Image (cartoon, rainbow, N blue to C red):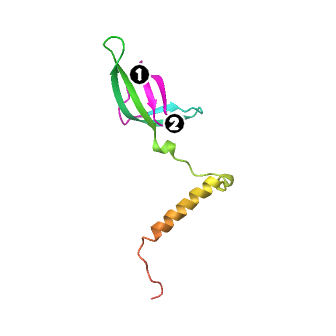
Amino acid sequence: MIEIEVQNETHQSQHKLRFSAVPRIGEGVRMREPDGRWASYDVLDVWYQKAEYGDVWVPYLHICMTPEEQGMPEPQDDVARDSPLAQHRHADRADALAQFGSLLPRQDIGR
């Protein structure tokens, strides 16, 4: 087992964890969140520093939660759909669609 210091960019935290192999840049790792659920993280950077003892190089990882894990899922029930956050997200989508619609070529109807 290899003890690696993991620097979590999502939560701005540092932990020492044991791995059987050093993950490579771009690989994914599963880690437990502070609330107890599991989440996927991407390895952003791997580097080695010389340890204070002997001629040993210690690995370090920078990780960040994957975009899929960071995204908020769509509300599934009516109560969640009526929440202020859901209404705000719906309004943002409507604004984006209106702006996109203004870029489309205009067509005259009834000619």
Where residue 3 sits: x, y (%)?
A: 42, 19
**Quadrant of the image containing the C terminus:** bottom left
Report how far apart the C-alphas of labels 1 and 2 lie in the structure: 19 Å
Where residue 25 sits: x, y (%)?
A: 35, 34
**Quadrant of the image containing the N terminus:** top left
Decide: is 33 above or below 100: above
Where residue 89 sits: x, y (%)?
A: 57, 56
Mark 2 surroundings: few (<14), some (14-19) or many (≥20) residues within 10 A: some
Which residue range is magenta in the image? Answer: 1-28
Decide: is 70 above or below 59: below
Decide: is 62 above or below 19: below
Residue at point 49%, 33% (across, down)? 12
Residue carrying label 2? 39
Contact (CB < 8 A) between labels 1 and 2?
no
Q: Is residue 20 magenta?
A: yes
Badge 1 amino acid: Ser
- Of circles 1 and 2, which is in front? 2
Q: Is residue 100 magenta?
A: no
Q: Secondary structure at mark 1?
A: loop
Compared across the picture, whether 20 is left or right of 96 comes to left
Q: Residue furthest right?
A: 79
Residue carrying label 1? 20
Residue at point 44%, 30% (across, down)? 7
Residue 110 vs residue 83, the one in the foreground: 83
